[in-house]
Amino acid sequence: MDPIQAAIAELQAEVRRQRDEIQFLRNQPPDQRPKTKPKPSLPDPEKFSGQSYKFDTWLPSIKAKLRVDSEAIGDTVAQFYYVYLNLDSHVQAMVLPQLGQAEESQSWDYTTILDQLSRVYDNPNKVQEAEDKLLSLKQGTESLPAYVAKFERILYEARGQNWPDVNKISTFRNGLNSTIRGRLSQQLILPRQYPDFVRVVQQLAGRSSSLSQAQAPTSGNGAGHHHSEPMDLGAIDLNAISPSQQQQRELQRLERYCIRCRSVDHWVQDCPQKPHISDKLVVATIDEDDYDDGSVSDVSGLSDHLDWRKRV
């Protein structure tokens, strides 16, 4: 037989065999079909290096991996070795007795490794220490979001998530800075539920920040600064403070003659004896001198005139 035809015949026989196998598996009941190994859902945790501060994060990670991906890891033997191989070599040496006991008794319980590590690296006083830290926590100059995040983390470390709301609110409030506590004291009604209380504090802090920015002076060229300066009477323009037409008419009615030379031919502003006065208002004693020397007969009109100048 031709070698090519022989190869084709062999391939055709393999295809028929696989087709028959697929058909056989399809005809099997679902509970009798062979199960395929699922793919893992979670990534592998980092190997535990024996540092105490990393144990609190490694232990939940390895437990989550074994709980979620147990089928992907395999049976109890595979799970036991999975935990063992996620330890650095010097930590593996610490749990070698648990490995020897498992091989001898054929009881592959990975919790024996985790329990041994907990006795060595876990801090039995961490809850009390976290509670003390929570009670002494202060916001200081930190932003409110940073303070809330830190408070929530330590609250769970202290197992305080189930505390009564009044205890959580009191502890949270005592750690706030004086500015926010002052704004809270101005509120007549405050929430009694801890999440609602935190929300109110965030709103007050946001308003306080917006108000501070709005009231901040603007830099550059003195913008935003208002300086009150004393009035310089010698630099005020007469045209800028001239009386209204009605006031002028009233003055003309009262001043029936020149109060300097007592002539009825002209008014005081047209008097030839009047000295030259600049356009700037000068607090002069022209009219007051006339008043003092008794040369004015209409005292009431002159007094009104002087009072008007002083008011301006």
Image (spheres, rainbow, N blue to C red):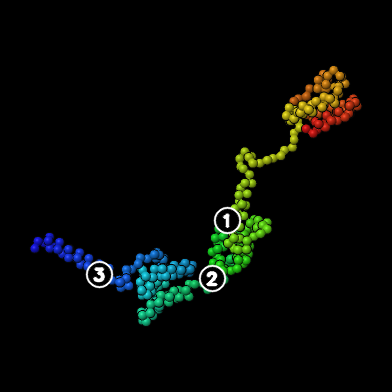
Q: Amino acid at mark 3?
A: Phe
Cα–Cα gap, marks 2 and 3 = 60 Å
Label 3 secondary element: helix
- Residue 189 screen position, x and y as percent: 66, 59
Q: Which residue is mark 2?
A: 126
- Residue occupying the point 12% across, 63% down: 6
| Residue 219, image x, y percentages | 61, 42
- Element type at marker 2? helix
Can the viewer see residue 52? yes
- Disc 1 to disc 2: CB gap under 8 Å: no
- Residue that extends furthest to the top in the rendered view of this protein: 265
- Does residue 112 lie above or below 64 as drawn? below
Asked whether 224 or 32 is in front, the reply is 32
Residue 8 image offset from top left, x and y in percent: 15, 61
- Mark 2 or mark 1, which is nearer the start of the sequence? 2
Q: Give the residue furthest to the bottom.
A: 105
Of the residues tagged 2 and 3, which is closer to the observer? 3
Look at mark 1 in the image and give the residue it sits on: 143
Give the residue drawn at x 62%, y 46%: 214
Side of 22 relative to 214 (left or right) = left
The disc placed on residue 24 is 3
| Count of labels in the image | 3
Disc on the earlier residue, 2 or 3: 3
Q: Amino acid at mark 2?
A: Lys
Asked if residue 237 shows in the view, the reply is no
Mark found first going from the N terminus, 1 or 3: 3
Amino acid at the residue labelled 1: Ser
Which of 310/94 is in front?
Answer: 310
